[in-house]
Image (tube, grey):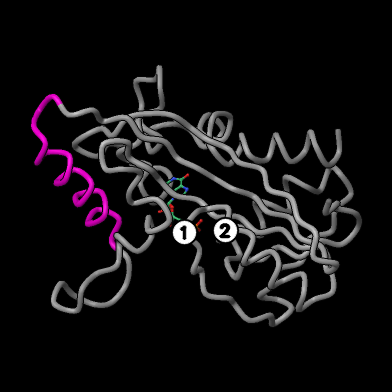
């Protein structure tokens, strides 16, 4: 099984993600460096599941760098929509050329989810979950994955301005505030990412 020790490549080109993960692993003496800083190529995320995509990214970074690598993949899955948008969570935010400049519009994506739910009537089941899969891969080809979840429902209209992505429509189970209305510390205590990292830390450093 792939184990973290010393230097770890974080298979992301996103500086914010690197900072967040580096801070989480610093207490365990892990020295994180991003795939972007090493100039590693970004593989296509062609997997049919979060785990497949996380493994594609982790293996690619481990092979290219010769170091143990960690990758994550995440998204939101709506039960009534058969788990969609799932691995296409970010793609649902892509603007079409006729809707303005290229880029991602999260209100477009949230509206698409709501539109599909509304088609099924007022009594539709709005259950959903955020998923986060962390994959660790070694240059020797071994790997391990940790899956975290946050259960909730799709709220409408969107509420709150904190956070990113689908946060304004995610109402965590048992809560009254969406992820975009919660303080970051409160969100991080119950998020899918926190759940996955808790499993990683327990297994790798416990
Ligand atoms: P990726 O794992 O970076 O590819 O992210 C996939 C997409 O899932 C992101 O672009 C977000 O829109 C969505 N997502 C993942 N985690 C969260 C979250 O904590 N809040 C809101 N959206 C999220």
The reply, left or right, for residue 193 in relation to residue 87 is right
Which label number is shown at residue 52?
Answer: 2
Q: Name which residue lies at 58% across and 38% down.
A: 148
Do residues under tags 1 and 2 come within 8 Å of each other at their CB atoms? yes
Q: Which of 115 and 50 is in front in this view?
A: 50
Dot 1: what SS? loop
Name which quarter of the figure residue 32 lies in: bottom right
Q: Where is residue 107 in the image (x, y as percent from the top left)?
A: 24, 53
Q: Quadrant of the C terminus?
A: top right
Of helix, strand and loop, which mostly describes the magenta segment?
Answer: helix
Q: Is residue 108 highlighted in magenta? A: yes
Per the rendered image, the range of residues in magenta is 105-123
Q: In this view, does 151 lie above or below 71?
A: above
Name the residue nearer the viewer: 30 or 136.
136
Q: In this view, does 75 lie above or below 172?
A: below
Circle 1 is placed at which residue position?
48
Q: In this view, does 96 lie above or below 167?
A: below
Residue 140 position in % (x across, y down)? 85, 67
**Circle 1 Cα neighbour tier, 10 Å, few/some/many (<14 / 14–19 / ≥20):** few
For image coordinates 37% across by 55% down, the residue present is 89
The residue positioned 25% from the left and 32% from the top of the image is: 155
């Amino acid at each position: 099984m792939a184990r973290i020790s010393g230097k770890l490549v974080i298979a992301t080109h996103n500086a914010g993600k690197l900072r967040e993960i580096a801070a989480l692993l610093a207490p365990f003496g892990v020295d994180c460096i991003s795939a972007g800083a090493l100039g590693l190529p970004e593989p296509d995320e062609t997997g049919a599941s979060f785990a497949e995509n996380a493994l594609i990214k982790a293996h690619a970074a481990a092979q290219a760098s010769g170091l143990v690598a960690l990758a994550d993949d995440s998204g939101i899955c709506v039960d009534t929509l058969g788990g969609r948008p799932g691995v296409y969570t970010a793609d649902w935010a892509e603007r079409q050329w006729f809707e303005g400049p290229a880029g991602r519009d999260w209100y477009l994506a949230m509206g698409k989810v709501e539109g599909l739910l509304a088609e099924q009537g007022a009594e539709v089941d709005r259950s959903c979950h955020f998923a986060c899969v962390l994959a660790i891969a070694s240059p020797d080809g071994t790997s391990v994955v940790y899956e975290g979840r946050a259960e909730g429902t799709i709220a409408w209209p969107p509420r709150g301005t904190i956070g990113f992505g689908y946060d304004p429509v995610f109402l965590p189970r048992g809560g009254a505030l969406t992820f975009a209305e919660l303080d970051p510390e409160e969100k991080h205590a119950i998020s899918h990412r926190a759940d996955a990292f808790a499993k990683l830390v327990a297994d790798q450093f416990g």
